[in-house]
Image (tube, rainbow, N blue to C red):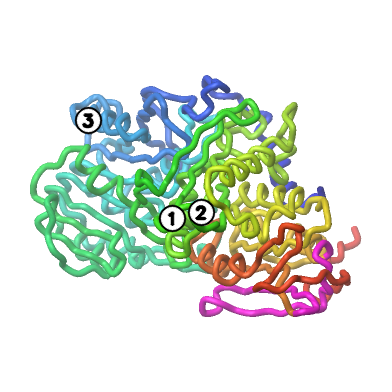
Amino acid sequence: MKKNAFVSMLLALVMLASCALAAEYTFDPADPYTGVMSGLFNNVAITVEEDTGIATYYLPKGLQPWANAAIILTPDNTTAEAFAASETGEQWKAVAEANMMAVAFLAPIDGTWNLDGEGADDGAIVNQLYFTMRSKSVKLDAPFSMDKTHTALIGYGEGGAAALLFGAEYATDFANITAVDAPAVSAEALAAIGEQVVIPFPADGTQGIPEMNVLAKNVPTPVWFVSSETENALDYYLAAGKAAEAEKNEYAETVYAAENAAVRIWVSGETQTPETIWNAFAGQNKRFMGMEDGGRVEFVIDKSTENFIWNEEEIGGETRRWITYVPSSYDGTKAVPVVMSIHGYTASAASMVEESRWHEIAEKEGFIVIYPQGMVRDLPLMGNVPCAMWLGGAFTMLAGDMDPMTDANVLNTILDKTEEAYNVDKTRIYCTGHSNGSMMTFTLASTNAARFAAVAPIGAFSTLEITGDAQLPVWAMCGEFDSAATPALVEGNGTVTMLQSWTAHNGIDEARVSKSEEHDGQWQTMTFVNESQIPMVKFTNVLRTAHIYMPEQPQTVWYEFFSKYTRGEDGTLYYEGEPVAKGTYAADAAWYEPAPVEEAK
């Protein structure tokens, strides 16, 4: 394996993490998917510069990887510990247990929420709590695997006003906001926050802030005002969501709807229980990063329908899971294509359903999607509690005593089982993945190219030895502000060496390269073609995005790439029904920048 920027970053993290003291947790390899931390954790310090807030966590026993979460802001003069022990707090703990989600209660720094900008920065503490809950570091008091796309912000009393104010200030953190019994928020405070620039990509820290210039007032957010004063705040969120009055429902007397139906704004005068707040509203939205400024708000997908088949079997001595999406049109009489869509490090099969939405294309076009679940492994050198991961690409260095091909073998076995259970068109099997799942895609492609008709790794690149001589079309993508891959094409970097490895394998003259733009110029694509002008290697830099996998990618990959390629039983690759002849590789340096010359010391 050639060393690239991501490998260097991984090694640095490993070295740093090796100095950390592990939190006290229990990991059972026989029950790997059950969260290793559970219970009530009081007096969790959340610090930003000189300010420290105190939180209480509740993690129910049985918490699964990539869990949803809610942050509850207490009323004035109420500690997090006291509110967690109150009747309302107990109800939230019951909601956590019923939905296998995490709850964090947070009190104001000085006893009362600072809603006018004078004094302690409570908003920064709320934001830091979100990032701390996402961290998973064993250095924390109660680390767990949190779904960064599904964190609801809920406040009671003055905490409700704080939720409305700080939820606007850090809008891209939260899937939605609920304010219960909240007093009015000042127009001046909201106006000031509205002009602030928000973090455009919470998952990638502070990257892209000046370039994106996303103002808080332009970020749509679902909000529920429960027995709360709506003065100023309602107008603010209506303007942010471009929402208009709509038909009332059983929960709210006044309802506003945006063009995006997931951006709902409700106003109700009656008291609502935590169970209703979560089930009807707070638990129904996710906020993903996306092509839109400030991300995209979506409804949670109902994965309990008969189309989603949840599988769990022992493979290679381990309990492995995967979700199979079978389209409504499937009746077994016709062989159908298969797409395997692989999630990233710490995430889950269910999250890849939500993030990629491959099943929506599958339902329309009549193919099967496999969403495999990464194995939860205890890898202390990563510095995190046990998280779902794949032994692919650079992550194979973490295999230790395990066979580094363990996960590749498992995924091939899952494909075998899918072919046995369904009428699969074996000439049309495709693979894609994000981040660590992208590395896993590269591993599968490099070791078993003949099994796939095309692959699309997104968000992390690996340069591996490619075995066999079967041609394999590859479309790699990353974001302009990606934290795990670079869009820069510079001699010797990971992106260039990865592309060179596949142009060489596919027998491409690199002088036959063209550039194009899609999605109003946001997608900058480079395409290497063979002598017959068939695209064999593609690379796309998605401007104004970060380390994400979004629905526009599956849509484009399927219709413009996957659907055009098939693999014959003898291994021959076909493009739109015509066999693809392999040419002779010829390197060309015109498509990338030369390596920088090191200055003499």
For residue 30, side relative to residue 96 (left or right):
right
Give residue 491's quadrant in the image. Answer: bottom right
Position in image of residue 321 (x %, y %): 52, 36
* SS of the residue under disc 1: loop
Per the image, the residue denoted by label 3 is: 91
- Give the answer, above or below, for where 273 lies relative to 240: above
Closer to the camera: disc 2 or disc 3?
A: 2
Q: Is residue 437 left or right of residue 371?
A: right
533 lies above or below 97: below
Compute the Cα span from label 3 to label 1.
38 Å
Q: Is residue 159 visible?
A: no
Query: Is 552 above or below relative to 251?
Result: below
Q: CA distance from mark 2 to mark 1?
A: 7 Å
- Measuring 49% from the left and 37% from the top, which residue is drawn there? 311
Magenta stretch holds residue 522? yes
Residue annotated with mark 1: 327
Q: Which residue is mark 2?
A: 368
Residue density around tag 3, few if under 14, some if 14–19, many if 20 or more, within 10 Å: some
152 part of magenta stretch: no
**Callout 1 crowding tier (Cα within 10 Å): few <14, some 14–19, many ≥20:** many
The amino acid on which the numbered mark 1 sits, given as a three-letter code, is Pro
Q: Amino acid at mark 3?
A: Gln
Callout 2: SS: strand
Q: Which mark is residue 54?
A: none
| Nearer to us in this view, 304 or 88 | 304
Question: Which span is picked out in magenta?
Answer: 504-532
Dot 2: within a 10 Å radius of its alpha carbon, few (fewer than 14), some, or many (20 or more) residues? many
Numbered circles on residues, count:
3
Question: How far apart are the two marked residues, 2 and 3, measured between alpha carbons?
Answer: 40 Å
Q: Are marks 2 and 1 in contact (CB under 8 Å)?
A: yes
**Left or right of residue 207, residue 588 in this image:** right
